[in-house]
Amino acid sequence: MTRTHAPVSLPVTLTIAGSDSGGGAGIQADLKTIEAHDAFGTSAITATTAQNTTGVKDINVLPTDHIAAQYDAVVDDFDVGAIKTGMLATAAVIETVTDCLAEFDGPVVVDPVMVAATGDRLLSEDAEAAYEALFDHATLVTPNADEAELLTDRTVDSVDAAEAAGRDIVDLGANAALVKGGHIDGDDVVDTLVIDESATDATHTEGFSHPRIDTDATHGSGCTLSSAIAARLAHEETLTEAVAGGVAFMERAVRYGIDAGEGPGSVHHLVEMRERADREATTAAVERIVARLVETNVEPLVPAGGMNVVGATRYAESAAEVVGVDGRLSQTRTGIRHNAGVRSGVGSDLAHQLLAAREVFPALRFAATCRLDDAVEQALDTLDGAVVRGSGASATEVVATALDDADVPPAAIIDAGGADRQPAVIVAAPTAATLRKRLVGLHDALITE
Ligand SMILES: Cc1ncc(CO)c(N)n1
């Protein structure tokens, strides 16, 4: 018997870039990012680098005719929806790529890669000038502040200077420039998009601001951003949509970077897909905790308004990414019950409190609310972790104040209560098994008192 073949059609995205043997940047980053955007990734490799998280050890630039042959092989066969360029290594490669792109009429994102995050040069000295001709074919150029300085001969140390540099790059021939703010000081990173409005002979500027993530593990972030934007353009998003979506994608990839190698590590290109994949396992883990609480009949721990249990996926950033009991566990004559299931996005106070705790201790993934009375407060002494106290008008403020000067993830957070909040204690843990043990342990301590 044969089965009907069921192929899908995905927008094709081409990366013209170098290979990073360390996997975090270059074509390795590009292909992962493109595939994470539901596009089909193809590549023309300009150079191979012997590279890891500590630095670039060797660079082998491929012959320009072979680079052009890779390009032709891809565009002759596929309907390429968008192209991005990354490490181009030498002026000769930039010129080859410029010739190739002269024939292409889809969107082109040029990431003018010059220096790796480790500080090693990826573009030969004096090749910067060759970029000018390439910019004529660019829908968008995505320099960081250092690259913008070299391209425009300006000092780029403020948002205003970034905007001026963006205008210069548009004057050089690009349709738009996104001057990234990561290398400009400030608690927030502001990426500045300057778009040529040829109809009015003016430029339009938009800022994309996001909180700075406190890390130097940004290896691959520029490659990831430009590939995300290219894949989104291949999906026919507008430039502004593609930039906003790409910036948000990159921000999450940086926050949940991968701790690999001796150096600062890599960004996590597939983080959104892994977040989705984690929901099922997280739901099952919360269901197992709930089943155990029902079986143990932890009634002395259940608050008057019912008990809530939540679990965050490893990469949870919003209430949609936290699973919890839909409704609460409440006390009945025959034990504790819940009459709805466990699902993601319940958006309870506890879900928001867990997210607030994860801002400080991202390893915390599971939490439950318990009744706060003298007996429970005494039983907290038996917990295997720190007990902290918070106060504030809102549920999340309580968590933020409680964790203000904590240096380890606490086992419990005491909330003295507020205007419309009962006093409660939040028991938290990095794993479902630890939360279950802590809750059952508290219950055992209460009934054996
Ligand atoms: C191959 C390659 N391309 C780009 C970068 C920039 O991060 C890098 N480190 N390596």
Image (cartoon, grey):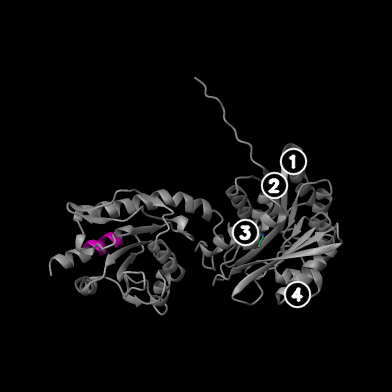
Residue drawn at point x = 72 percent, y = 72 percent: 146
Q: Earlier in the sequence, mark 4 or mark 2?
A: 4
Q: Amino acid at mark 3?
A: Ala
Marking on residue 161: 4
The C terminus appears in which quarter of the rendering? bottom left
The label nearer to you, 4 versus 1, is 4
Q: What residue does disc 3 label?
A: 25
Compared across the picture, whether 313 is left or right of 155 comes to left
Q: Earlier in the sequence, mark 1 or mark 2?
A: 1
Q: Is mark 3 within 8 Å of ligand 1?
A: yes
Residue drawn at point x = 26 percent, y = 51 percent: 291
- Callout 1–callout 2 Cβ contact below 8 Å: no
Q: What residue does disc 2 label?
A: 236
Q: Earlier in the sequence, mark 2 or mark 3?
A: 3
For mark 1, give the secondary structure.
Answer: helix
- Callout 4–callout 1 Cβ contact below 8 Å: no
Please tell me how crowded label 4 is: few (under 14), some (14-19), or many (20+) other residues with Cα within 10 Å: some
Q: Which residues are magenta?
A: 435-440
Q: What residue does disc 1 label?
A: 73
Q: Earlier in the sequence, mark 3 or mark 1?
A: 3
Outermost residue to the bottom: 405
Compared across the picture, whether 223 is left or right of 137 comes to left
Q: Amino acid at mark 2?
A: Glu
Q: Amino acid at mark 1?
A: Ala
Task: Let me know if residue 387 appears in the view.
Answer: yes
For mark 2, give the secondary structure.
Answer: loop
* x and y percentages locating residue 192 in the rendered image: 71, 67
* Image: 365 above or below 81: below
The Cα atoms of the two marked residues, 3 and 1, are separated by 24 Å
The Cα atoms of the two marked residues, 2 and 3, are separated by 25 Å
Q: Amino acid at mark 4?
A: Ala
Compared across the picture, whether 334 is left or right of 392 comes to left
